Image (cartoon, rainbow, N blue to C red):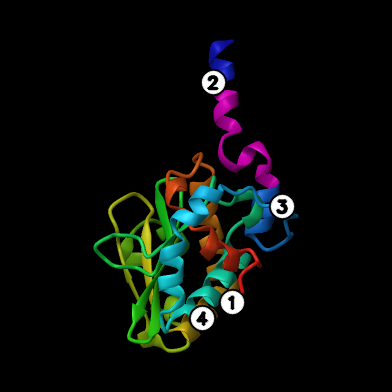
Amino acid sequence: MQGTRKKGRSDTGGLRQFLGLEQQQAWRDGDSELPDAEERPEATELRFKYLPRYHKLAARPQAAEVFELLRLYARQCIPMPRRTERFWWSVSCLPSTSDKPLVRVNASWMELFTLYADGDGVRGRFIVHLSDFTTDGSVTPEQLDELRLTGSVAAAEDIGWFFPNGADIFGIRVRGAASLRQLLATPWMRRAIRRFNLTHMNRGRNAYQASHSYSVADHMVGEGG
């Protein structure tokens, strides 16, 4: 009996406690929309803690593009972003890491999406499953479908990639808001991003809750200015 209870807790961890696997798969494949919450639970102290960073970001020349791209990413790639905010995903504003990002979206212990300054413009980085980008569905880098990747952006030179440590992990770098928007509008690419995000949101509560910027998230869930 004890073993059965432990298995039950594992089966309902992460998003599975309120979103069944069939529902997740239908959303991942673009076959259904998920009803989101109307209200957002909020920690007021946390909002004010990161408000100075938000104001600093909002004064940057890239701010409008950053907020637009985050809004698109949340709408296209995060299941029920209001209901899952902070506890299953979070966004950090000007995080203090060596690569100096503008914003970073995380789930569980994993980076999902990061935006950086590129002159007065932006560049982005996505972490996804390698098996969604190989010609045979394997995790073999030599089988990478490079033509499909370069066809997902406005110009082939706008996209690059790398192979982080870890099983079935792949990194995509994209330069420019136009190519980032096109990539997010590509159905097969959107499905791949959704699959990776579901993988990590199902691993349990987000480890980066304490660095969540509600002011940045306002733009992602439709309350930004």
In the figure, residue 33 lies in which quadrant? bottom right
The residue located at (58%, 68%) in the rendering is: 219
Q: In this view, does 133 lie above or below 4?
A: below
Q: Nearer the viewer, mark 3 or mark 2?
A: 3
Q: Is-magenta flag for residue 18? A: yes
Give the magenta range: 7-22
Give the class, few, some or many, for how many residues have Cα within 10 Å of label 4's Cα (few <14, many ≥20). Answer: few
**Tag 4: amino acid:** Ala
Q: Is residue 21 above or below residue 125?
A: above
Separation of marks 3 and 2 at Cα, in angstroms: 32 Å
Which residue is labeled 4 in the image?
64
Give percent across and percent down for residue 95. Answer: 35, 60
Which residue is labeled 1 in the image?
185
The residue located at (29%, 58%) in the rendering is: 164
Q: Is residue 127 left or right of residue 162?
A: right
Give percent across and percent down for residue 81. Answer: 62, 56
The residue located at (38%, 53%) in the rendering is: 168
Kindly indicate whether the residue at mark 1 contacts the one at mark 2 (C-beta within 8 angstroms): no
Q: Is-magenta flag for residue 87? A: no
Which residue is labeled 3 in the image?
39
- 35 and 82: which is toward the camera: 82
**Tag 1: amino acid:** Ala
Separation of marks 2 and 4 at Cα, in angstroms: 47 Å
Q: Earlier in the sequence, mark 3 or mark 2?
A: 2
Separation of marks 1 and 3 at Cα, in angstroms: 27 Å
Whether residue 120 is visible, yes or no, is yes
Callout 4 secondary element: helix
- 185 and 72: which is toward the camera: 72
